[in-house]
Image (cartoon, rainbow, N blue to C red):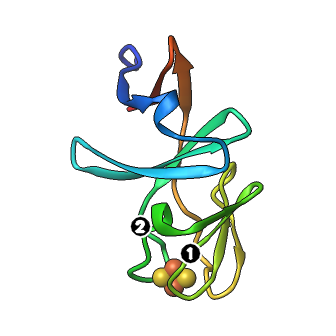
Amino acid sequence: MSGPCKYLALCQASDVAPGKVIKVEKEGLTLAVFNIDGEFFVTDDACTHGPGSLSEGEVDGDLVECDFHNGAFNIRTGEAVVAPCMIPIKTYKTLQEAGAISIEA
Ligand code: FES
């Protein structure tokens, strides 16, 4: 039996403009919150390739390019799509409710 879902509130939808990403630190997690045309996605902030921070990267459609070595991930799926990134980035089930962005924790 699994317990009830818990939600972790991260920020307001209005904190993240379309095509942008912000970094949110909550309960020991460092996360990147993306807005793709009004749809919100949350991934780990740390690039799986090295010291890059995806919230400092460049959002291009569904992709985020790490500004460290210019690898890229699919924001929706976490898939590593441009080398040197090989390992997918962790994604979180994201909810938008009453203007607040949360993840299932
Ligand atoms: S640290 Fe992100 S591409 Fe190398």
For residue 51, side relative to residue 64 (left or right): left
Q: Position of residue 56 (x, y in %)?
A: 47, 67
Q: What residue is disc 2 on? A: 46
Residue under the point 50% across and 18% down? 99
C-alpha span from label 2 to label 1? 10 Å
Give, as a three-letter code, the residue at label 2: Ala
**At 63% from the left edge and 88% from the top edge, which residue is drawn?**
84
Q: Nearer the viewer, mark 2 or mark 1?
A: 1
Q: Secondary structure at mark 1?
A: loop
Provide the residue designation for mark 1.
66
Provide the secondary structure element on which disc 2 rests.
loop
Q: Is residue 49 visible?
A: no
Mark 1 belongs to which amino acid?
Cys
**Residue at 62% across / 79% down in the picture?**
86
Q: Which one is in front, 64 or 12?
A: 12
Residue 55 locus on image (x, y percent): 47, 60
Q: Quadrant of the C terminus?
A: top left
> Where's residue 46, x and y in %?
41, 67
Above/below status of 41 relative to 2? below
Furthest toward the right, the residue is 61
Label 1 within 8 A of ligand 1 by Cβ: yes
Q: Quadrant of residue 11?
A: top left
